[in-house]
Image (cartoon, rainbow, N blue to C red):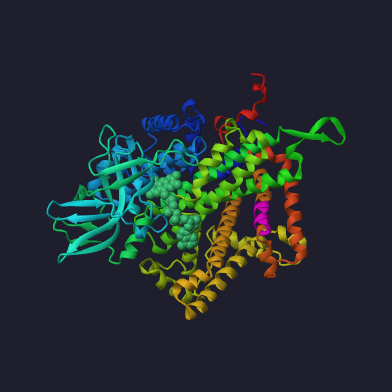
Amino acid sequence: MAPNEKTTADHLRDALDGRWRDVKNQTRVQLSKEAFRPHHTPNTVIARAKVAEQMQLMANAGISDEGFRKEHGGTGDVGAAITMIEMLAMSDLSLMVKAGVQWGLFGGAVENLGTERHGDYIKDIITLDLLGCFAMTETGHGSDVQSLETTATYDPETEEFVIHSETPTARKDYIGGAAETARMAAVFAQLITHEDGKPVNHGVHCLLVPIRDEDGNDLPGVTTSDCQYKGGLPGVDNGRIMFDHVRVPRVNLLNKYGDVAPDGTYTSPIDNPNRRFFTMIGTLIRGRVTVGGSAGAAARVALDIATRYALQRRQFSAPDDDDREVLIMDYLVHQRRLFPLIAKSYALQFAQNELVSKTHDLQTSDVVDAEEQRELEARAAGLKAANTWHASRAIQEAREACGGAGYMAENRLIALRADTDVFTTFEGDNHVLTQLVAKELLTAYADDIKSMSPVEWVRFAANTVGDRVMKRTAAEAIMQRIIDARQDSEEEGSLFNRGTQVSMFEDREDYLLSSVARRLQGKSKEMSAFDAFNAVQDHVLHAAQAHIDRIVLEAFVAGIDACPDPEARELLDVICDLYALSVIEEDKAWFIEHRYLSTERAKAVTRGINDRCRVLRPHARTLVDGFGIPEPLRYAEMLHPENLAD
Ligand SMILES: Cc1cc2nc3c(=O)[nH]c(=O)nc-3n(C[C@H](O)[C@H](O)[C@H](O)COP(=O)(O)OP(=O)(O)OC[C@H]3O[C@@H](n4cnc5c(N)ncnc54)[C@H](O)[C@@H]3O)c2cc1C
């Protein structure tokens, strides 16, 4: 091979890197520097100090401005900003979370919910001269943000808002940065003005509230505390905040979607309070996209480490060679444990690339189609859940696949496991997000539902039965070509035809959605909307899961189509097969029960997976090389037996 010729692994990496390939390559160089080498300590003091140092290095290097608009001193490249934060997950998840809170959540709230009068804050947020936190969750309410109890009551006499924790459960909780570092909080609170002397609640809004002075002391009326030790993320100072009638100027309201005039008159470009709330929350979608992508990156690091270990670790003598033991990667069960997870990592990364691209396009566009926005929100929710659940599963499997060595901190897997655990909960609990996906699907992304109460939307969903049309997410032409080439036969080989696989995914989603909608329709006549929805909640989640699996498969198909190298494409085809067959195997019972799979073909699925594991075995290293994780970021002591003598 000529020196500059690309290897198959290079082509795989390019395919997985997608549209922000250049940003990924630049970030790989930055993260390979000594300061970003993965380190592990459960000591929160050391971990927090290290993250602060790394954040400053990033700000000094001028790489924290990507996501902010040009008029605020940024580059306006939303995709680059998301990509950069996701990549940090390969170095240290505490760093990823702190960067995500400062520049993504806090900075994102100021930029997306604020107006010109808040533009000056952005410069200081980029440089870290203003450290902030995103104070949404309360002890009493996490998933149900509309029911937060903190109030922001306007006082026209002084032209100030009074921020108050009305009850003990109104305490802001788990907030990243609130324990120690944040000087200012973006506080979500019920906005109250007075009309004819009576209080009027306009729903949840966001206000900037200074919480600490320059010396780090709580400001008057503010009481912060430290969540201390957690299940992971030792470098993140999660904390709690209570407000006792804290006054902030009127202009501290982030007023893009709702404003209060000096005399106390409330105005908003969006009349309906539900619609206003969901529009505000929709603009903060970037955090969710980043969390999913970062979990995906962490899963790839773990699978990379476990695969390399399996390629050097030997256990039990080989039958025909007493002097040699068997490489653990040569055991079918070991391949069965790692390869389907590697395949899913590939699949999810292609889907994540499409999501980042779509987020970028919509957030940098002047005119946004309402249906497109809702589709984006559903996709971000679904892929956040898929990526974070995958990370939990893959990292645990990688840990076990490395035996006792996998449990040693120096080999990274336990930190990856502990740090990603909570990714299934924050930025939206996965079960709640999966329901959100179903809600969008059942209502065909109709913009009207933003304005509806839960009772109204269940009725709407029940009546939308039959109006839904399956929307393909990847290039329609590619998918149609593939579907047209499907093999509708009982033969075993048809299962390995991509068109047949895509059809099986589509049919399952369509069946589950239509049947849940019909059940909802029937039950709505007999019981309350809440009871009707609750009676089919498991079915709803299954339908959403089927949808997520389908859009991931479509993204994989489009990713293969875009790969120019024949050898890499051939390998991607096998990996894609493994992904599709693994999904079918996991839901085998459903496919059999609904007669989409005979028992004979169901057995063929299992055989097909085993065959593909055998085919991929010689390419194990290439598969993980394709993840493109720089050597310093996938360093694990057990992979360097040459250090054993020390
Ligand atoms: C380490 C960490 C960092 C965090 N950082 C921040 C931050 O910086 N800023 C911030 O604002 N928040 C932050 N959070 C809060 C986080 O976003 C919330 O914990 C999350 O939204 C879930 O809310 P909850 O904890 O109240 O769980 P709950 O909403 O009480 O959920 C508990 C369980 O009930 C289930 N459940 C809830 N509703 C339903 C339903 N309708 N149907 C079925 N099941 C349901 C959920 O699936 C879940 O399993 C952080 C949390 C942690 C742990």
The residue that appears at 27% across and 43% down in the rendered structure is 222
Q: Is residue 127 magenta?
A: no
Please report the bounds of the magenta region as a residue range. 576-585
Q: Position of residue 256 (x, y in %)?
A: 27, 55
- The residue lying furthest to the front in this view is 168
Q: Quadrant of the N terminus?
A: top right
Asked where in the image residue 55 lies, by quadrant, the reply is top left
Indicate the quadrant containing the C terminus: top left, top right, bottom left or bottom right.
top right
| Magenta: main secondary structure | helix
In this rendered view, identify the residue nearer to me: 133 or 627.
Answer: 133
Q: Is residue 346 above or below residue 228?
A: below
Q: Nearer the viewer, residue 621 or 96?
A: 96
- Give the residue furthest to the top: 646
In percent of width and height, residue 96 lies at 45, 39
- Percent across and percent down for residue 306 are 65, 38
Q: Is residue 571 visible?
A: yes
Q: Position of residue 182 (x, y in %)?
A: 32, 39
- Residue lying furthest left in this view? 157
The tally of labels here is: 0
Q: Is residue 177 left or right of residue 28?
A: left
Query: In which quadrant of the rendered view does residue 185 lie?
Result: top left
Residue 625 showing in the rendered view? no
For the point 63% across and 47% down, which residue is it? 341
- Give the side of residue 307 with respect to residue 601, left or right: left
Reply yes or no: does residue 578 show up in magenta: yes
Outermost residue to the right: 320
508 relative to 558, above or below:
below
